[in-house]
Image (cartoon, rainbow, N blue to C red):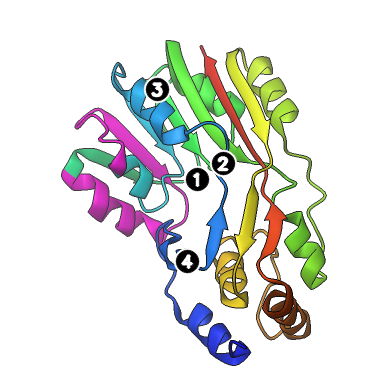
Amino acid sequence: MADYDALMAAAEAVPLHGWDFGWLDGRAVTMEPSWRYDDLARELLRDADRVLDIDTGGGELLASLAPPAGRTWAAEGWPPNVPVATERLAPLGVTVVGTEELPFPDNEFSLVLNRHGRFDAVGIARVLAAGGTVLTQQVGSEDCVDLNHAIGAPATDRRWNLGVATEALTAAGLEIVDAVEEWPLLEFHDIGAVVYQLRMVPWQVPDFTVARYDTALRRLHGRIEADGPFAVRTHRFLIRATA
């Protein structure tokens, strides 16, 4: 049996920066949705004039897409991520702006990308140029709710899904081109992976600490050791819309 305390110590010792879940390799397996956001974004970037990436994290995904130098801006609202994103993206000719808002002129961008970022339909519509496109992949409110149930944590009462988001974009004056919603599986292979996930995604269980949830975590650890990986449903939806 894997040592619970050792797994806890390892998961808590990993520094958190950017938006890199690489530590989970071999510890957790995420089933991808039927679409590939990065491929869709890369295709749109080919013809994009001025690009905005909302909530870029540490710039990991945007950097992999080879954005157009001198014509791409990345907004990031979490202060610790801003220098990480700047170090990664500035050499690629991307301007990083540390902000939770969208402090850009009206009709500024031909392409707005938003993967798991804050969703401001009115703000996106305002900065999107006529004929421009927004591509967003969002995490729905049912995401990993079984993890909350497993450790006795309350689940969000916020309703966030494809219907709510498309309604907001339509109300803001955009035309929906593609819209799809799925619930892929996420499997945790040890309790350390669960803890790391909850550290990286603090809004899942806002009051999470190992000490506070120790009893439930030990119970879940025993369950994984006895029965194998602990699986939950994620919640993803993708929208492409035009101005």
- What's the residue type where badge 2 is placed? Arg
x 69%, y 59%: residue: 231
Q: CA distance from mark 3 to mark 4?
A: 35 Å
> Which label was assigned to residue 26?
4
Residue at (66, 78) in percent of width and height: 209
Q: Secondary structure at mark 2?
A: loop
Report the mark closest to the observer, 3 or 1.
3
Q: Which mark is residue 100?
A: 1
Closer to viewer: mark 3 or mark 4: 4
Q: Which residue is mark 3?
A: 111
Q: Is residue 221 magenta?
A: no
Q: Quadrant of residue 195?
A: bottom right
Q: Examine the rendering and report whether any part of residue 194 can be seen.
A: yes
| 73 in the magenta segment | yes
- What kind of residue is marked 3? Leu
- The residue segment tinted magenta is 64-91
Q: Quadrant of the N terminus?
A: bottom right
Separation of disc 4 and disc 2 at Cα?
A: 29 Å
Amino acid type at circle 1 is Glu
Q: Is residue 70 left or right of residue 176?
A: left
Looking at the rendered structure, which numbered label has been put on residue 118? 2
Task: Please report contact status of discs 2 and 1: CB closer than 8 Å, yes or no.
Answer: yes
Q: Secondary structure at mark 4?
A: loop
